[in-house]
Image (cartoon, rainbow, N blue to C red):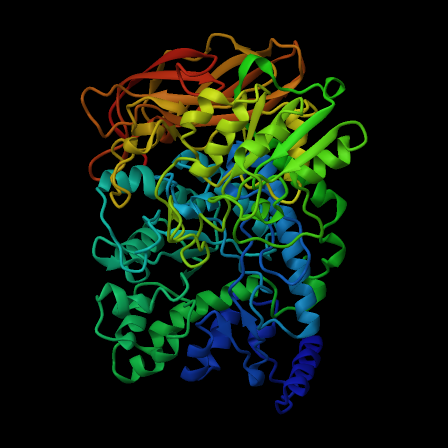
Amino acid sequence: MKQYYFVRILLLGLFFGMPPLQAQTIPAYLDTTLSIDVRVNDLVSRMTLEEKVSQMTHTSKGIRRLGIPDYNWWNECLHGVARSTEKVTVFPQPIGLAATFNPEELFKSAEMISDEGRAVYNASVKKANTLQRYTGLTFWTPNVNIFRDPRWGRGQETYGEDPYLTAKMGSAIVHGLEGNNPEYLKSVACAKHYAVHSGPEHNRHSYDARVSMYDLWDTYLPAFRELVTKAKVHGVMCAYNRFEGTPCCGHNELLQDILRNLWKFDGYVTSDCWAVSDFAKYHKTHSNDTEAVADAVLNGTDLECGNLYQKLQQGVEKGLISEKDINVSLARLFEIQFKLGMYDPADRVPYASIGREVIECDAHKKHAYEMAQKSMVLLKNNKNILPLNASKIKRIALIGPNMDNGSTLLANYFGTPSEIITPYKSLQKRFGNSIQIDTLTGVGIVQKLEGAPSFAQVAAQAKKADIIIFVGGISADYEGEAGDAGAAGYGGFASGDRTTMKLPPVQTELMKELKKTGRPLILVNMSGSVMSFDWESRNADAILQAWYGGQAAGDAITDVLFGDYNPAGRMPLTTYMNDEDLPDFEDYSMANRTYRYFKGDVRYPFGYGLSYTTFAYQPLSNASIVKTGESIQVTTTVTNTGKRDGDEVVQLYVSHPQNGNTRVPLRALKGFKRIHLNKGESRTVTFTLSPEELALVDDKGNLVQKEGPVELYIGGGQPYKSEGSFGELKIEGEPYVVY
């Protein structure tokens, strides 16, 4: 075996132009019989300070004399391998994936994404172009920030407003991306943006997020905690903003006290891109970049996405940081590379043989289609106008800016598939020979089209049809990351964020004309967040929230509209009645935000979604008393009482007495299962509530289970807003500290 490694290092030496090594001096870092710690320490010990520093930015050029390969740490796979030159499978945007309420299927999506990512990487190794961005195996996914405000443009990248849902969906992504091999990682996930980072975009490089200990531990940290302590994610990205006056990428409490010491995180931390340059430039917390980079490393940011860490050598010379400190971060980075198998023979690494045949394979395309189906949320269905009966329709007026806009379906941080199925392409493919489909764009996303027919003329044409399908909404050109979404100057948008929850007025104006025709009006909305839908909720006959549904969204939409798929997606966000319901965007307090704390009326609640069938819930079965520190099971039986087969998202909510304490959620999701029931079929569903699910965060940030009554609810949505059953539980015993 050792002879094999000698041959390998000899070949590496010849390839890189390094002198041959003596047979008896096989480097320990290439000996797979040794532990990773030993191998990593051996490799680090052979490096000069200059070489060490060169490996601590996202573009890490190889070191020939040691056989260290070129590597670019920067890669993305938000909903498929992103920004690759390869044609890849593109799944729905994460907010749409969250709407599936199905972590098991999301796990499968992540497995497929990591397979395609491995294939791209393996191909890049053969081409010796691993220094190129978007070829590596360190994916900066998932985004588990809380979508606390629907105006945030990047909220589409998250799993919604609820910490519990976010934690479960984020964990599914981590497990799927990283694989289950005990020795090697298939790829590396990265929980971002740590921490307290949820917009606005325009001042993210200088913003100072200040929150109470309660909100920090009740809302902003739980998903990160779960991904680190339970999912065992190997990467964390620190955020651009400051937290309580200190840049997150130089924050000792966040990165050392909590992440490393309390949660025992042993992976690597990367900065967001050029975040360290913000220390001196925008945050004004450091006098120069040399001080900034030294502070970032000392506080736990191992890798910089950027180009300032080259100043670390100067920092050592000035006594701001020691080479020993640098070794700590460097060892973490090499440990990741070793776990990816980058220094081992290919035949030892189970993922090294994954080839191009997995990219856009039939199974992956099929699953992208199924996830798009599962993500669809039916918000309104007046007089059961849906599903449509194709045999009774002779003509459809298909109108709106997103009816044939493939780029909208891809959202942001996207890859490029070989085929994008828009609603128009889907309808034409399925019904083009039997139904006349009149395509009338009618309007752009935010403005009238130059030289286009008037709204009255569009409506006159639409009146000739049996039904009007308006495919509207917005796109990632208007909501997204600052610098990517170029909608500044248009009403309703600013620096990637939205300034209103309303649908762009020009679209509502056109729909008002269409309503005058007397023809049924169906709105299919594409967006990464919610719309307030004031006029639309009162006047459209049906509303389907389609998110940014990925490459197969058009077929999924057609399936729902015509009844080939029974929708069961649920809202991962609260749809507020109007803009005035929202607190100031820059206020990070959770008071009167999200379903957990908002006390006003809402249009469509978190967890809401309609079906073409109905479900009934039997009374809950559970013990009446549980001791602190113990778990309890809660059971119900769900029956499909309608005339169609379909999925039901069974949701468990826990409510503690308020007693005038505003720092107690009104209710909180603590369990969910998506199940399929044929018409007339019943199924028993059981949830286990652990002390963690039954505890509350105190003012100091501790999660504590205390005695007292608890209201339980299991249903197809929130209490009083869905079919379901209530139950009671009494907690007894001394306070139990979960963490």
User: Residue 504, position in %: x, y?
Assistant: 44, 39
For this orientation, the residue located farthest to the bottom is 19
In this rendering, the count of numbered labels is: 0
Report which quarter residue 119 is drawn in. bottom right
Residue that appears at 30% across and 56% down: 203
Q: Taking 361 as reference, is 132 left or right? A: left
User: Residue 671, position in %: x, y?
Assistant: 46, 26
Q: Taking 634 as reference, is 730 left or right? A: left
Report which quarter residue 591 is drawn in. top left
* Any part of residue 607 in sight: no
Q: Quadrant of the N terminus?
A: bottom right
For this orientation, the residue located farthest to the right is 433
Q: Taking 637 as reference, is 209 left or right? A: left
* Any part of residue 274 in sight: yes
Report which quarter residue 578 is drawn in. top left
On screen, 47 above or below 460?
A: below
User: Residue 120, position in %: x, y?
Assistant: 66, 61
Residue that appears at 73% across and 21% down: 390
Residue that appears at 34% across and 63% down: 300
For this orientation, the residue located farthest to the left is 660
For the residue pair 629 and 382, the one nearer the viewer reads as 382
User: Residue 157, position in %: x, y?
Assistant: 47, 46
Q: Quadrant of the C terminus?
A: top left
On screen, 278 above or below 711?
A: below
For the residue pair 215 and 403, the one nearer the viewer reads as 403
On screen, 496 above or below 700?
A: below
For the residue pair 505 and 141, the one nearer the viewer reads as 505
